Amino acid sequence: MKLPVPLSLALRELRHEWLAALCFIAALVGVLAPLLLLLALKNGVIGAMVDRLVEDPANREIIAMGAESYDAAFFVRAEGWPETGFIMPATRRINAQASAVRNPATRALDRSVPLVPSAPGDPLIASDRGVLPGSVWLSSELASALDTTEGSEIEMLIGREVDGTRETARLPLTVLGVLPSDAYGRKAVFLSLQDLLAVEQFRDDLRLSADDLDRAESSPERYASFRLYARDLNDLQPLMNRLATEGITARPRVENVALLLGFRDNLNLLYGFIAVIAVLGFWASMVANLRGMVERQRVSLSLLRFLSMPHRSVARIPLAQSLVLVGIGVMLTLVLVLPGLVVLNTVFQAPSGDPVARLGMSDIGWVLALGALTGASAAIWAMRAAASISSEEVLRNG
């Protein structure tokens, strides 16, 4: 297949000035390779880390302060707020506790275990199977201490003292699942509000014996606290404002939410700024080099005009040189970077199993498109200079 004349001449000139072309390609690889590596890290471990922080339900939790109490009407209103992701009544301002939790199969026992009220939709439980009466979710620390797994049966022990006599009620429960340590890092039992009320009722109602512990017959008129989560981080401050209008003092569990949101929103902007600065610097260097190549080839280009080559064809020679150099530089960069990412992901493995650095096909496509745009735009000055060369110059300088 015969190449177009401008492209053929451009390739021959690059072969003649191979050292300058090699330096040009090396400069492009030196700029582009770090940018691609940074993009791969942003797509991989950096992006995953930021997403994990943003999506962590603990960052969306609001903690009630003060000594207020809350009636059923408040929970109905709060559940209807569009910013509310999850709300749950709590019987105490700090977590209630079971006297002990025991695994009958292994006889493993853990004392003074916090009880956390939960329900379907609990953001800490990444499952459609929310707790129901008679079932619980365990934190990973507690499940490890009890040597129990999903589907096992455990026993909750609730103690009280009546007239100097120690009484203990036993509540059998089924383990629906185990929360990962990053969801809840302490020992706890996540149980239904009905079971929690039964525990509180046994401790408070001396008419209820240890042998016939039953579910609470009625809910209390008011609750001491609540578990509240915003739908997402952007809803956290509006939800705080709603609580303030209710006269409720509360605070977010994480104080630097605005910083976290800003970092997430500006991560792409930050990378784009770095990339633009680097590309503009290389683009300026490329413009100057291409213009210099035209000056070095001025007599040769004038000779082509003398041999009746049209202005447009002469102007396409620096354009072809620019696109060829950029194309070789981009392809060489990919040849170096892609195997390097494989090695990087093999040596440094993320705990989650996700790749540390990742480039998608869309990223590679954008790099190729940006390279073509950079090469074409950088050649404009050189093209205009080449087109302005007259045929008489070869006679004056020949």
Image: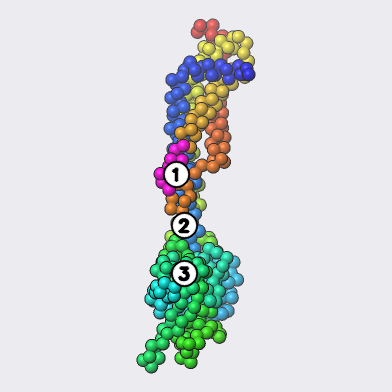
Residue in the picture at 62% in, 11% down = 308
Provide the residue designation for mark 3: 138
Q: Nearer the viewer, mark 1 or mark 2?
A: 1
Residue labelled with disc 2: 53
Q: Residue 9: give x, y in percent of width and height.
A: 56, 16
Q: Which of marks 1 and 2 is nearer the N terminus?
A: 2
**Mark 1 vs mark 2, CA separation in Å:** 22 Å
Q: Is the magenta stretch mostly helix, strand or loop?
A: helix
Query: Magenta region: which residues?
Result: 339-349
Please give the residue where the numbered disc 1 appears in the rendered image: 345
Disc 2 residue type (three-letter): Leu
Q: Earlier in the sequence, mark 3 or mark 1?
A: 3
Pinpoint residue 390: horizontal percent, then vertical percent: 57, 13
Image height of 48 relative to 227, above or below: above
Mark pair 3, 1: CA separation: 33 Å
Q: In terms of depth relative to the viewer, which is nearer, 351 or 149?
A: 149
Q: Residue at x 56, y 28 (%)?
A: 376
Residue type, numbered disc 1: Asn
Secondary structure at badge 2 equals helix
Above/below status of 258 relative to 287: below
Could you say which disc has been placed on residue 366 in the image?
Answer: none
Residue in the image at 48% along x and 80% along y:
171
Q: Which amino acid does label 3 sit on?
A: Leu
Q: Nearer the viewer, residue 60 or 145?
A: 145
Visible in this render: residue 245?
no
If you read the primary sequence from the N terminus, does the residue marked by circle 2 or circle 3 appear first? 2
Residue under the point 43% across and 24% down: 23
